Each structure stands twice: as C-alpha cells, then as structure tokens.
C-alpha cells in the first residue's frame, strides 16, 4: 500500500482494468456458478453491511435467513429442517460431518471414518484433513453412481457417516439415495446428501428422483443457492432433519448480541442471505423450474448435436452436466483446441472426458457455436 491513497475515479479505472481480465460467463462451460439474477444483486447491495455473525443487530437479515432456510427445507421435503445459510457446499459439507463427528466423539468413539463415493467433491478431502477422520472412497457402477455393495463392504464399527451425492460435480449423476438410506438406517449411521449442485435442479426435472428429506434416513443435505439458485456468492445452505445436530456445532459467543453460533465462520455476509431470500421469493418453484427446463432443453440439444457428429456422452445426462467421450489420448487435445477458440471447458478424472456445464448463462446460439467448433477440432 502507498502512503497516500488515490482519487476515487482513479481507483474505479483500476477496477475496470482488472474486470476486463476476468472471463465473461458467456463462453464458460466449466463453471457451476453463473450471473446472479438482478433481484439477487439488488438485495445483495442493499444488505452489504449486514453481519449475521452478530445477528441480534440485523434482525431483518436474520429473519430472511430463517425464511430462506424454511423455503429451502420445503423444497427438499421438510419445511421444519434446521440449518443456516453457509458460504457454500464446502462449509455445508464440513459442518454436516463436523456435527456427527462431535456427537460420536462425545459418545467416546475414536478413529472414525466416513464413506463417500469416488466421485465425491474434493471438499471431502479437506474434511478428512480438518476433522481427522478417514475418508473411504466407494466404487461406482457402470452409470457412475455409487455402488451400494462397495459402500456396504467399507462400513465397519468406526463408520459414522455415509455420503450420497445428488448431482455429482463431474458427471451430474445422482446416487441411489434410497438404497443408501436403507443401509445407513439399519446400522444407525448418519446419511449426508451432498446436493450442492443438484438441490436446485433435481426437484424440477421431469424424471423424479427420491433424494431429499422425503427419504427416511436422510439426516442432512447441502444445497448451494450460489450455483443453480441464481443467488450471489457466497451462498450455500446446510440443513439437518434433527435440530440436536446444530447444538453439536454451537459455541458460546461472549460480547456479541447472540448467545451462540453454529456457523463455521464468524463474521458472515447478510448480503448473500438477502440475495438468496430475494431470488426464492421472486422465482418461486415455477420460476426455478423454468430455468431448469431451459438448461435441460439446451443440454439435450448439445448431446444430440454431439451425437450427430459422432461424439457420444459418457452417460446420458441426468441433469445439465454433459461429459463427452473421446479416445483417452484425444481429450487434452480437443480441450485445448476448444480453449484456443475461447471456450472454457474442463476434463473429468475417471473416466477421462470433456466436461461441460450448461448453466443459465448458456444460450441456444452458444450451444450452436460450440457444436460448430467441436466439429472442427475433433
Ligand atoms: C460445488 C460443489 C461442492 C462445493 O461447493 P462450494 O460452494 O464450491 O464450496 C460440493 N459438492 C458438490 C457436489 C458440488 O458440486
């Protein structure tokens, strides 16, 4: 930092220069984030200074959090679920495992483990590290869903939690949550559903999947408003069926207006909570369904177009995530040729494939232009 500050206009100019270096979402096919809706941006700006870490001072923001949690709970089959608006899927996943870890530690259990699918998001590797628990990875079936037999084989008397993913980050696949629930319930194991991406997609698909609190045995769910919920970053949500798990997370907060805190972080944004509340009120189920339908329509267009030029998907897309197979040696070449044409794409780990996420910023012209380029470079 310099001794003397700059004129405000000069700082704005600096910001514009930096902004130009960011990639606009229009050609981004790798991200699970998108432009927040304008009502989200409006609410975000309005509540910019609200700190939910000290929520006694920000009653309006606190009410919006409670209402948003209730609206999301209702979407996920339980309007009486308990939780809070987090910073995203990572914090939500951490807190779910943190809660059950604390419960079992109080019960005297040591050297605990959790079982996640091989497709689990890397946040579970952070969790293993932070909470000192072993993270066991279960194998997948041919359709890249977790293989429940593999999960069963990995379970032992130190297993505190099984994780199912409703919308895998790489393939957009949905694990068989009902089957996981029956395994978990029979053994009194906590079942966490990671629906960070899928939570705002699956309820609106034509095909119905049982993945939420309507499945008996689902203990907690993470869902991200800052992905398909059209809210601003940072906005995740962690929900528990049973309120007592929140108290496993509570720490006393002397000198604040509240008595205790369950969130992982202290000072936290009321702005993205307001944004989340605003989009849910604005869209309603009907509006969110329309967004998902449009993304799915374009997903089908993309897959049909790819098939027409001889490129097949790894799995038939379940949601708005498309993975395209190429001979192993070709994937990197195709991806970098596409990047040269300005597209931002990614590559999955296993099987190795080209990955595209069809978010609401992707339009029909985008898909057509992408398919033309794909045909050229393949
Ligand atoms: C994106 C994602 C996460 C991580 O969420 P962040 O908001 O990036 O912390 C976790 N799980 C799944 C399935 C995801 O898609």
Image: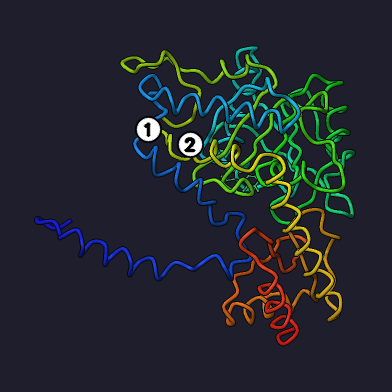
Relative to 36, does residue 18 appear above or below in the rendering? below
Could you say where residue 122 lies in the image, as x and y percent from the top left? Answer: 62, 48
Which of the two residues, 100 or 337, is positioned nearer the viewer here? 337
- Could you tell me which quadrant the N terminus lies in? bottom left
Mark 1 and mark 2 residues within 8 Å of each other at the beta carbon: yes
Which of the two residues, 280 or 166, is positioned nearer the viewer here? 280
Disc 1 designates what residue?
A: 50
Relative to 316, does residue 302 appear above or below in the rendering? below
Which of the two residues, 65 or 236, is positioned nearer the viewer here? 65
Count residues near mark 1 (Cα–Cα under 10 Å), then give few for <14, some for 14-19, many for 20+: many
Relative to 242, does residue 281 appear above or below in the rendering? below
Q: Residue, x 63% and y 43% (percent of image)?
A: 283
Relative to 339, does residue 132 appear above or below in the rendering? above
Q: Circle 2 sits in a helix, a strand or a loop, which is it?
A: helix
Q: Is residue 370 left or right of residue 181?
A: left
Q: Residue, x 45% and y 41% (percent of image)?
A: 43
Real-space Cα separation, disc 1 to disc 2, in angstroms = 9 Å
Quarter assignment of residue 217: top right
Could you say where residue 26 lies in the image, as x and y percent from the top left? Answer: 57, 68
Could you say where residue 219 lies in the image, as x and y percent from the top left? Answer: 73, 25
Disc 2 designates what residue?
A: 274
First in sequence: mark 1 or mark 2?
A: 1
Could you say where residue 196 lies in the image, as x and y percent from the top left? Answer: 65, 43
Q: Residue, x 61% and y 36% (percent of image)?
A: 93
């Amino acid at each position: 930092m310099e001794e003397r500050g700059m004129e405000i206009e000069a700082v704005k100019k600096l910001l514009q220069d930096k902004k130009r270096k960011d990639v606009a979402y229009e050609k981004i096919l790798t991200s699970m984030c998108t432009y927040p809706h304008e009502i989200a941006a409006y609410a975000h700006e309005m509540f910019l200074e609200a700190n939910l870490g000290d929520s006694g001072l920000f009653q309006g923001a606190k009410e919006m959090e409670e209402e948003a949690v209730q609206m999301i709970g209702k979407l996920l089959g339980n309007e009486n679920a308990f939780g809070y608006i987090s910073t995203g899927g990572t914090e939500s996943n951490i807190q779910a495992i943190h809660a059950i870890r604390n419960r079992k530690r109080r019960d005297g259990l040591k050297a605990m483990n959790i079982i996640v699918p091989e497709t689990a998001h890397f946040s579970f590797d952070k969790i293993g590290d932070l909470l000192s628990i072993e993270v066991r990875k279960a194998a997948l079936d041919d359709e890249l869903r977790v293989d429940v037999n593999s999960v069963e084989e990995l379970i032992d008397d130190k297993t505190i939690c099984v994780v199912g993913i409703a919308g895998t980050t790489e393939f957009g696949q949905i694990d068989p949550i009902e089957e996981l629930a029956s395994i978990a319930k029979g053994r009194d194991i906590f079942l966490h559903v990671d629906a960070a991406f899928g939570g705002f997609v699956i309820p609106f698909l034509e095909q119905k999947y049982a993945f939420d609190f309507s499945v008996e045995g689902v203990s907690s769910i993470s869902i991200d408003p800052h992905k398909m919920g059209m809210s601003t970053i940072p906005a995740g949500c962690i929900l528990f069926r049973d309120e007592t798990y929140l108290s496993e997370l509570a720490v006393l907060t002397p000198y604040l207006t509240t008595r205790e805190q369950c969130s992982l972080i202290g000072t936290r944004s009321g702005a993205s909570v307001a944004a989340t509340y605003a989009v849910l009120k604005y869209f309603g189920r009907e509006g969110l369904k329309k967004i998902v339908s449009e993304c799915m329509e374009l997903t089908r267009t993309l897959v049909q177009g790819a098939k027409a030029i001889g490129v097949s998907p790894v799995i038939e897309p379940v949601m708005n995530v498309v993975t395209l197979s190429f001979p192993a040696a070709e994937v990197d070449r195709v991806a970098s040729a596409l990047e040269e044409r300005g597209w931002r794409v990614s590559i999955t780990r296993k099987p190795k494939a080209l990955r595209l996420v069809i978010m609401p910023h992707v339009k029909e012209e985008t898909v057509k232009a992408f398919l033309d380029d794909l045909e050229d470079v393949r």
